[in-house]
């Protein structure tokens, strides 16, 4: 027979005040009948699943992906893998255990940002915190924090993520302050976070992004020490599937 409405309400209110402890659970597991213990186990499994789902949803919101992606149907043909690192290593997120970095470098529209976004989604599914920024949005965020006197707090917040994506590095040049702020993030992440960069620029051209060859060299030095380079070659996916393709060909 189902519990009364009053008892059900009391159960909910009591549950709000409780954090479950191992000793109490063990005692009630011993005292209960097999059916009671089975019922309690079913409840705890449902509660754990609900908390996991809430955690994943919260992490995905905090990651701030502009357009969440997955690897379902992903076109791997543009990717060239470095020695000793392949698709299985990427999808297992094993590179994150060693706080290794990834540089996704190559042609526009070949899947770099899609890959970085899908890695973030995978982390959130595994209840691992990830953050996604374009290089320009990250610099603007840091600049506002610096102007407001809360740069240290902002850097600490970014530093809590186990995976940090810096997308579109090199699309826009940085001024001296922006370059310094971005360098602080990279320096802080060294050997404490895994950073994924997407860029269409070879390392030799990173000096033009940072406006300073020495600062660019310092960034590259940190990235390549524990990093792997994935190269992307091919025609842009967006061009291949563009609605205006016929018109572009005529022009």
Image: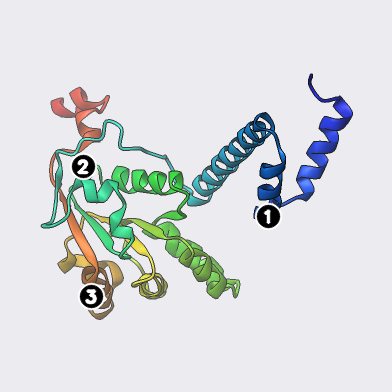
Q: Nearer the viewer, mark 3 or mark 1?
A: 1
Name the side, left or right, on which 28 lies relative to 49: right
Is the residue 59 above or below the residue 144 in the image? above
Quadrant of residue 169 within the rendered picture? bottom left
Frontmost residue, 45 versus 91: 45
Quadrant of the rendering where the N terminus is positioned: top right
Quadrant of the rendering where the C terminus is positioned: top left
Secondary structure type for disc 1? helix
* Mark 3 to mark 1 CA distance (whole Å): 51 Å
Labelled disc at residue 221: 3
Residue at the (42%, 40%) spot, across then down: 67
Q: Nearer the viewer, mark 2 or mark 1?
A: 1
Q: Nearer the viewer, mark 2 or mark 3?
A: 3
Specify which label sits upstream in the sequence, 2 or 1.
Answer: 1
Frontmost residue, 219 versus 238: 219
On the image, the x and y values in percent for residue 235 come to 15, 38
Write down the residue under mark 1. Answer: 23
On the image, the x and y values in percent for residue 88 come to 22, 46
- Residue furthest toward the right? 6
| Residue 227 appearing in the image | yes
């Amino acid at each position: 027979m189902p519990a009364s409405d009053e008892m059900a309400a009391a159960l909910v209110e009591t549950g709000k005040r409780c954090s479950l402890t191992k000793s109490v659970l063990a005692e009630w597991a011993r005292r209960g009948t097999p059916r009671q213990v089975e019922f309690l186990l079913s409840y705890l499994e449902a509660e754990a699943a609900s908390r996991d789902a809430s955690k994943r949803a919260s992490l995905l919101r905090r990651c701030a992906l502009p357009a969440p992606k997955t690897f379902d149907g992903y076109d791997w043909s543009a990717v060239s893998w470095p020695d000793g690192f392949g698709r299985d290593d990427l999808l297992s997120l094993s590179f994150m255990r060693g706080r290794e970095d990834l540089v996704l470098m190559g042609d526009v529209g070949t899947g770099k940002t899609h890959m970085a976004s899908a890695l973030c989604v995978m982390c959130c599914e595994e209840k691992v915190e990830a953050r996604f920024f374009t290089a320009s949005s990250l610099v603007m965020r840091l600049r506002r924090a610096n102007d407001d006197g809360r740069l240290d707090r902002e850097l600490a917040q970014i530093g809590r993520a186990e995976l940090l994506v810096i997308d579109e590095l090199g699309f826009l040049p940085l001024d001296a302050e922006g370059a310094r702020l971005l360098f602080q993030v990279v320096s802080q992440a060294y050997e404490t976070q895994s950073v994924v960069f997407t860029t269409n620029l070879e390392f030799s051209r990173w000096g033009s992004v940072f406006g300073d060859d020495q600062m660019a060299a310092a960034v590259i030095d940190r990235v390549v020490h524990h990093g792997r380079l994935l190269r992307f070659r091919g025609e842009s996916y967006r061009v291949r599937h563009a609605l205006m393709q016929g018109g572009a060909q005529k022009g």
